[in-house]
Amino acid sequence: MLLAVDVGNTQTVFGTYEGAKLSEHWRIATERHKSGDELGALYRSFLDLGRVTGICVSSTVPQLSRAYHEFAGRYTDAQLLEVGPGAKTGIPIRYDDPRDVGPDRIANSVAAVERHGAPCIVVDFGTSTNFDVVSADAEYIGGVLAPGIEISMDALAARAARLRKVDFVEPESVIGKTTVAALQSGVVYGFAGQVDGIVDAIRRELRSDARVIATGGLAELIAPHSRTIEKVDPFLTLEGLRIIWDRNR
Protein backbone atom coordinates (compact mmCIF):
# COMPACT_ATOMS: atom_id res chain seq x y z
CA MET A 1 0.00 0.00 0.00
CA LEU A 2 1.31 3.45 -0.97
CA LEU A 3 0.88 6.41 1.36
CA ALA A 4 0.87 9.66 -0.66
CA VAL A 5 1.33 12.85 1.37
CA ASP A 6 0.97 16.42 0.11
CA VAL A 7 2.30 18.75 2.83
CA GLY A 8 1.10 22.28 2.14
CA ASN A 9 1.74 25.47 4.09
CA THR A 10 -1.76 25.43 5.57
CA GLN A 11 -3.11 21.91 5.13
CA THR A 12 -1.76 18.41 4.60
CA VAL A 13 -3.69 16.07 2.33
CA PHE A 14 -2.81 12.38 2.37
CA GLY A 15 -4.28 9.19 1.02
CA THR A 16 -3.59 5.51 0.51
CA TYR A 17 -3.38 3.72 -2.81
CA GLU A 18 -3.97 0.07 -3.59
CA GLY A 19 -2.40 -0.06 -7.04
CA ALA A 20 -3.81 2.87 -9.01
CA LYS A 21 -6.92 3.24 -6.82
CA LEU A 22 -7.18 5.89 -4.12
CA SER A 23 -8.75 3.89 -1.31
CA GLU A 24 -8.90 6.49 1.48
CA HIS A 25 -8.00 10.14 1.92
CA TRP A 26 -7.81 12.75 4.69
CA ARG A 27 -7.16 16.49 5.12
CA ILE A 28 -5.57 17.93 8.29
CA ALA A 29 -3.90 21.17 9.39
CA THR A 30 -0.16 21.38 8.75
CA GLU A 31 1.87 21.79 11.93
CA ARG A 32 5.38 22.89 11.00
CA HIS A 33 7.23 21.73 14.12
CA LYS A 34 6.03 18.14 14.44
CA SER A 35 8.73 15.57 15.15
CA GLY A 36 9.05 12.17 13.50
CA ASP A 37 7.52 10.58 16.61
CA GLU A 38 4.57 12.95 16.52
CA LEU A 39 4.02 12.15 12.83
CA GLY A 40 4.14 8.45 13.71
CA ALA A 41 1.44 8.87 16.34
CA LEU A 42 -0.64 10.99 13.97
CA TYR A 43 -0.58 8.62 11.01
CA ARG A 44 -1.04 5.57 13.22
CA SER A 45 -4.37 7.05 14.34
CA PHE A 46 -5.59 7.08 10.72
CA LEU A 47 -4.24 3.88 9.18
CA ASP A 48 -2.41 0.61 9.72
CA LEU A 49 1.23 1.58 9.19
CA GLY A 50 2.18 -2.09 8.99
CA ARG A 51 0.47 -2.28 5.59
CA VAL A 52 2.38 0.68 4.14
CA THR A 53 5.04 -0.45 1.67
CA GLY A 54 5.87 2.93 0.15
CA ILE A 55 5.60 6.62 1.06
CA CYS A 56 5.73 9.44 -1.48
CA VAL A 57 5.88 12.96 -0.02
CA SER A 58 5.57 16.40 -1.55
CA SER A 59 6.38 19.11 0.99
CA THR A 60 6.41 22.89 0.73
CA VAL A 61 7.52 23.06 4.39
CA PRO A 62 11.28 22.30 4.44
CA GLN A 63 11.50 21.89 8.22
CA LEU A 64 9.20 18.86 8.04
CA SER A 65 11.39 16.99 5.56
CA ARG A 66 13.64 15.46 8.22
CA ALA A 67 10.63 14.59 10.40
CA TYR A 68 9.04 12.59 7.57
CA HIS A 69 12.26 10.66 7.00
CA GLU A 70 12.43 9.89 10.74
CA PHE A 71 8.78 8.85 10.75
CA ALA A 72 9.23 6.51 7.77
CA GLY A 73 12.36 4.91 9.21
CA ARG A 74 11.06 4.42 12.73
CA TYR A 75 7.38 3.60 12.27
CA THR A 76 7.23 1.79 8.93
CA ASP A 77 9.20 -0.67 6.83
CA ALA A 78 8.44 1.46 3.78
CA GLN A 79 10.77 3.18 1.38
CA LEU A 80 10.26 6.96 1.32
CA LEU A 81 10.49 9.08 -1.82
CA GLU A 82 10.42 12.85 -1.38
CA VAL A 83 9.64 14.67 -4.63
CA GLY A 84 12.52 16.99 -5.43
CA PRO A 85 15.81 17.15 -7.32
CA GLY A 86 16.77 13.70 -8.57
CA ALA A 87 13.26 12.25 -8.61
CA LYS A 88 12.09 10.98 -11.98
CA THR A 89 8.95 12.86 -12.95
CA GLY A 90 8.59 11.95 -16.62
CA ILE A 91 8.24 15.58 -17.73
CA PRO A 92 11.08 18.01 -18.55
CA ILE A 93 11.22 21.07 -16.26
CA ARG A 94 11.90 24.17 -18.39
CA TYR A 95 12.48 26.57 -15.50
CA ASP A 96 15.51 28.81 -14.93
CA ASP A 97 16.26 26.89 -11.73
CA PRO A 98 14.18 23.69 -11.49
CA ARG A 99 14.90 23.53 -7.74
CA ASP A 100 12.71 26.62 -7.28
CA VAL A 101 9.57 24.84 -8.46
CA GLY A 102 7.43 23.55 -5.60
CA PRO A 103 7.11 19.74 -5.60
CA ASP A 104 3.31 20.03 -5.41
CA ARG A 105 3.37 22.05 -8.65
CA ILE A 106 5.39 19.31 -10.34
CA ALA A 107 3.08 16.58 -9.03
CA ASN A 108 0.05 18.51 -10.30
CA SER A 109 1.59 18.90 -13.74
CA VAL A 110 2.57 15.24 -13.98
CA ALA A 111 -0.96 14.13 -13.10
CA ALA A 112 -2.60 16.68 -15.39
CA VAL A 113 -0.66 15.43 -18.42
CA GLU A 114 -1.37 11.80 -17.55
CA ARG A 115 -5.09 12.28 -16.84
CA HIS A 116 -6.10 15.20 -19.06
CA GLY A 117 -3.45 15.58 -21.76
CA ALA A 118 -1.21 18.44 -22.89
CA PRO A 119 -1.15 21.40 -23.28
CA CYS A 120 -2.85 22.20 -20.00
CA ILE A 121 -3.02 24.72 -17.19
CA VAL A 122 -3.44 23.61 -13.58
CA VAL A 123 -5.03 26.06 -11.13
CA ASP A 124 -4.41 25.00 -7.53
CA PHE A 125 -6.38 26.88 -4.88
CA GLY A 126 -4.13 26.61 -1.83
CA THR A 127 -2.29 29.02 0.44
CA SER A 128 -1.35 30.69 -2.82
CA THR A 129 -3.29 30.27 -6.04
CA ASN A 130 -0.86 28.51 -8.37
CA PHE A 131 -1.15 28.44 -12.15
CA ASP A 132 1.14 25.82 -13.70
CA VAL A 133 1.57 25.51 -17.44
CA VAL A 134 2.45 22.40 -19.46
CA SER A 135 3.21 22.85 -23.16
CA ALA A 136 1.92 20.82 -26.07
CA ASP A 137 5.23 18.91 -25.87
CA ALA A 138 4.36 17.89 -22.27
CA GLU A 139 7.05 20.12 -20.78
CA TYR A 140 6.62 22.12 -17.59
CA ILE A 141 7.33 25.68 -18.73
CA GLY A 142 6.44 27.82 -15.71
CA GLY A 143 3.43 29.49 -14.22
CA VAL A 144 1.90 32.25 -12.13
CA LEU A 145 1.65 32.63 -8.34
CA ALA A 146 -1.06 34.79 -6.76
CA PRO A 147 -2.22 35.28 -3.15
CA GLY A 148 -4.62 32.55 -2.08
CA ILE A 149 -8.24 32.98 -1.05
CA GLU A 150 -7.80 32.36 2.66
CA ILE A 151 -4.75 34.58 3.16
CA SER A 152 -6.40 37.33 1.13
CA MET A 153 -9.40 37.23 3.45
CA ASP A 154 -7.15 37.11 6.52
CA ALA A 155 -5.28 40.20 5.31
CA LEU A 156 -8.50 42.08 4.61
CA ALA A 157 -9.93 41.27 8.04
CA ALA A 158 -6.67 42.29 9.72
CA ARG A 159 -6.46 45.66 7.96
CA ALA A 160 -10.14 46.72 7.90
CA ALA A 161 -11.64 47.31 11.34
CA ARG A 162 -15.27 46.80 10.27
CA LEU A 163 -14.68 43.69 8.17
CA ARG A 164 -14.25 40.13 9.40
CA LYS A 165 -13.56 36.69 8.05
CA VAL A 166 -16.56 34.89 6.60
CA ASP A 167 -17.45 31.35 5.64
CA PHE A 168 -16.39 30.47 2.11
CA VAL A 169 -19.75 29.71 0.54
CA GLU A 170 -21.51 30.76 -2.65
CA PRO A 171 -23.57 33.94 -2.20
CA GLU A 172 -27.21 34.06 -3.25
CA SER A 173 -26.51 36.94 -5.64
CA VAL A 174 -23.59 38.98 -6.92
CA ILE A 175 -24.90 42.15 -5.27
CA GLY A 176 -24.65 41.53 -1.54
CA LYS A 177 -27.32 42.95 0.77
CA THR A 178 -25.17 42.43 3.89
CA THR A 179 -21.47 42.85 4.59
CA VAL A 180 -21.05 39.07 4.87
CA ALA A 181 -22.78 38.46 1.54
CA ALA A 182 -20.76 41.22 -0.11
CA LEU A 183 -17.51 39.68 1.11
CA GLN A 184 -18.58 36.23 -0.05
CA SER A 185 -19.45 37.65 -3.47
CA GLY A 186 -16.06 39.33 -3.66
CA VAL A 187 -14.32 36.06 -2.89
CA VAL A 188 -16.25 33.92 -5.37
CA TYR A 189 -16.57 36.31 -8.30
CA GLY A 190 -13.30 38.10 -7.65
CA PHE A 191 -11.22 34.94 -7.74
CA ALA A 192 -13.20 33.48 -10.65
CA GLY A 193 -12.44 36.67 -12.58
CA GLN A 194 -8.78 36.47 -11.59
CA VAL A 195 -8.58 32.91 -12.88
CA ASP A 196 -10.20 33.81 -16.21
CA GLY A 197 -7.98 36.85 -16.70
CA ILE A 198 -4.75 34.97 -16.00
CA VAL A 199 -5.79 31.94 -18.07
CA ASP A 200 -6.67 34.20 -21.02
CA ALA A 201 -3.23 35.81 -20.83
CA ILE A 202 -1.47 32.43 -20.60
CA ARG A 203 -3.42 31.08 -23.58
CA ARG A 204 -2.49 34.13 -25.66
CA GLU A 205 1.17 33.64 -24.83
CA LEU A 206 0.98 29.91 -25.54
CA ARG A 207 -1.05 30.52 -28.70
CA SER A 208 -3.07 27.54 -27.60
CA ASP A 209 -6.51 26.90 -26.11
CA ALA A 210 -4.96 24.80 -23.33
CA ARG A 211 -7.31 22.84 -21.06
CA VAL A 212 -7.72 24.18 -17.53
CA ILE A 213 -7.91 21.80 -14.57
CA ALA A 214 -8.62 23.08 -11.06
CA THR A 215 -7.64 21.43 -7.79
CA GLY A 216 -7.25 22.39 -4.14
CA GLY A 217 -9.63 22.78 -1.24
CA LEU A 218 -11.68 25.67 -2.66
CA ALA A 219 -11.72 24.64 -6.32
CA GLU A 220 -15.33 23.45 -6.12
CA LEU A 221 -16.41 26.88 -4.85
CA ILE A 222 -14.78 28.91 -7.63
CA ALA A 223 -15.00 26.61 -10.67
CA PRO A 224 -18.76 26.98 -11.37
CA HIS A 225 -18.28 30.74 -11.76
CA SER A 226 -15.24 30.56 -14.05
CA ARG A 227 -15.71 30.33 -17.81
CA THR A 228 -12.20 28.87 -18.33
CA ILE A 229 -12.06 26.03 -15.78
CA GLU A 230 -13.13 22.87 -17.57
CA LYS A 231 -12.55 20.22 -14.91
CA VAL A 232 -12.15 19.97 -11.15
CA ASP A 233 -9.81 17.16 -10.10
CA PRO A 234 -9.74 17.30 -6.28
CA PHE A 235 -7.00 14.70 -5.77
CA LEU A 236 -4.72 15.77 -8.61
CA THR A 237 -1.67 16.22 -6.37
CA LEU A 238 -2.06 12.79 -4.76
CA GLU A 239 -2.44 11.25 -8.23
CA GLY A 240 0.76 12.97 -9.28
CA LEU A 241 2.58 11.53 -6.29
CA ARG A 242 1.35 8.05 -7.14
CA ILE A 243 2.52 8.42 -10.75
CA ILE A 244 5.93 9.76 -9.68
CA TRP A 245 6.28 6.87 -7.21
CA ASP A 246 5.56 4.37 -9.97
CA ARG A 247 8.07 6.04 -12.31
CA ASN A 248 10.81 5.88 -9.69
CA ARG A 249 10.27 2.24 -8.78
Image: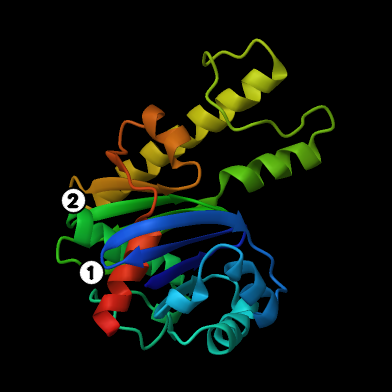
Reading the image, the residue beneath label 1 is: 139
Coordinates of residue 83 in the picture (x, y in percent): 42, 78
Q: Residue furthest left?
A: 137
Quarter the C terminus occupies: bottom left
Q: Residue at x 27, y 57 (%)?
A: 112
Q: Residues within 10 Å of mark 2 (few under 14, many from 20)?
A: few
Coordinates of residue 123 in the picture (x, y in percent): 39, 50
Name the kind of residue labelled 2 in the image.
Answer: Arg
Mark 1 or mark 2: which comes first in sequence?
1
Quarter the N terminus occupies: bottom left
Figure check: 124 above or below 37: above
For the residue labelled by badge 2, is the local secondary structure a helix, a strand or a loop? loop
Coordinates of residue 143 in the picture (x, y in percent): 38, 60
Figure check: 169 above or below 142: above
Figure check: 179 above or below 115: above
Q: Does residue 24 show up?
A: yes
Q: Does residue 83 show up?
A: no
Q: Residue 207 has which mark?
A: 2
Q: Residues within 10 Å of mark 1 (few under 14, many from 20)?
A: many
User: Which is nearer the eye, 110 or 131?
Assistant: 110
Figure check: 206 above or below 36: above
For the residue labelled by badge 1, is the local secondary structure a helix, a strand or a loop? loop
Q: Residue at x 24, y 53 (%)?
A: 120
Q: Where is residue 40, by image quadrant?
A: bottom right
